[in-house]
Image (cartoon, rainbow, N blue to C red):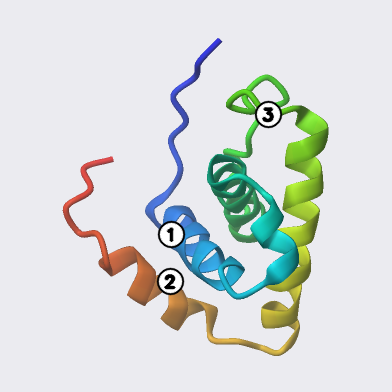
Amino acid sequence: MNKILFHSRRSRGLARYLLELSLQDLPLCQYPPSLLALAALDLGDEILSTGSRLDGMYTAGHGRQALTRCVEDLRFLADGLIQNSYDLDGVLEKYCNLYECENY
């Protein structure tokens, strides 16, 4: 069953940033890009508390366990940024504005 998921602009921007950071993290390179993208969206929603987290039915062909594992590995990367008081608003501003042509 395919679902169309809508995520906030800020959540998508944070997911883009997390995906870019993941390129430099060897343990995250083990995951297929589609799984990593789902994990980044899920984690972005969680961090920003948007309430639109992925449900157990939508894993784009990946198992729920694989998605959970990927989210946890990505969370390790994100927690380092949050704990170091990284300027999350600045990051969101940059990554939300990279793709102004989006209509959703």
Helix, strand or loop for disc 3: loop
Front position in the image: 5 or 33: 33
Q: Which residue is mark 3?
A: 62
Mark sitting on residue 92: 2
Task: Give the Cα distance between marks 3 and 2.
Answer: 28 Å
Task: Give the Cα distance between marks 2 and 1.
Answer: 6 Å
* Snapshot quadrant of residue 61: top right
The residue under label 3 is which amino acid type? Answer: His
Q: Earlier in the sequence, mark 3 or mark 1?
A: 1
Q: Are marks 2 and 1 in contact (CB under 8 Å)?
A: yes
Q: Is residue 61 above or below residue 77?
A: above
User: How many other residues sit within 10 Å of disc 2, few (<14), some (14-19) or many (≥20)?
Assistant: many
Front position in the image: 38 or 51: 38
The residue under label 1 is which amino acid type? Answer: Arg
Q: Which residue is mark 1?
A: 10
Q: Is residue 2 above or below residue 104?
A: above
Image point 59% across, 50% down: which residue?
A: 45
Which quarter of the rendering shows the N terminus? top right
